[in-house]
Image (spheres, grey):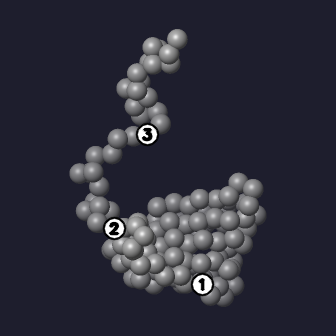
Amino acid sequence: MDISDNFSMDDLDGIFWKEIDLSELPESKLTNEHSVIIEFNEGLDGLEEIHELEKKLRDKLEGSDKGWWDGHELGMDTPEGMIFLYGKNAEELFKEVKPILEMSPLMKGAIAYLSFGPPSQDTPVIEVELDVQV
């Protein structure tokens, strides 16, 4: 018996993915090709630290034309993590969030990767080590 005999892919709509109508997204989110990805390894005592930092980042960027917060990834058995931000200009986006990042103990030793275009081998990327003051 083949699994496709029991259901069709249409049965999965809305369960594992959701179709997104791009016409519903703000124009600013459709043209954001630059990114700022922050890689950290200070380790977390709990999820409260990362959630608090992300709230500050979201609040700072909300209503701003600099960019938007897209989420984070955390290692299950490691102290590493990443924060993802996107915008029209990676440098302007980084300048907007840098003061918040540098006030978070979680960002000690963190590296920000500023990518100036869509993902590809030819897209210029610079690394910036954060200077955490806490």
Q: Are marks 3 and 1 in contact (CB under 8 Å)?
A: no
How far apart marks 3 and 1 lie (CA) works out to 36 Å
How far apart marks 2 and 1 lie (CA) works out to 23 Å
Residue 97 on image: x %, y %: 49, 78
Q: Quadrant of residue 128?
A: bottom right
Residue at the (51%, 60%) spot, across then down:
71
> Is 133 in front, or is 86?
86
Identify the residue under disc 3.
17
Q: Earlier in the sequence, mark 3 or mark 2?
A: 3
Q: Earlier in the sequence, mark 2 or mark 1?
A: 2
Identify the residue under disc 2.
32
Q: Please tell me whether residue 115 is drawn above or below residue 84 in the rendered image.
A: below
Q: Are marks 2 and 1 in contact (CB under 8 Å)?
A: no
User: Residue 75 bears which disc, if any?
Assistant: none
Residue 72 on image: x %, y %: 56, 61
How far apart marks 3 and 2 lie (CA) works out to 22 Å
Q: From this viewpoint, is residue 7 visible?
A: yes
Query: Mark 2: which secondary structure?
Result: loop
Residue 85 on image: x %, y %: 46, 68
Q: Amino acid at mark 1?
A: Glu
Identify the residue under disc 1.
129
Residue at the (47%, 73%) spot, across then down:
36
Question: Which residue is outermost to the front?
Answer: 121
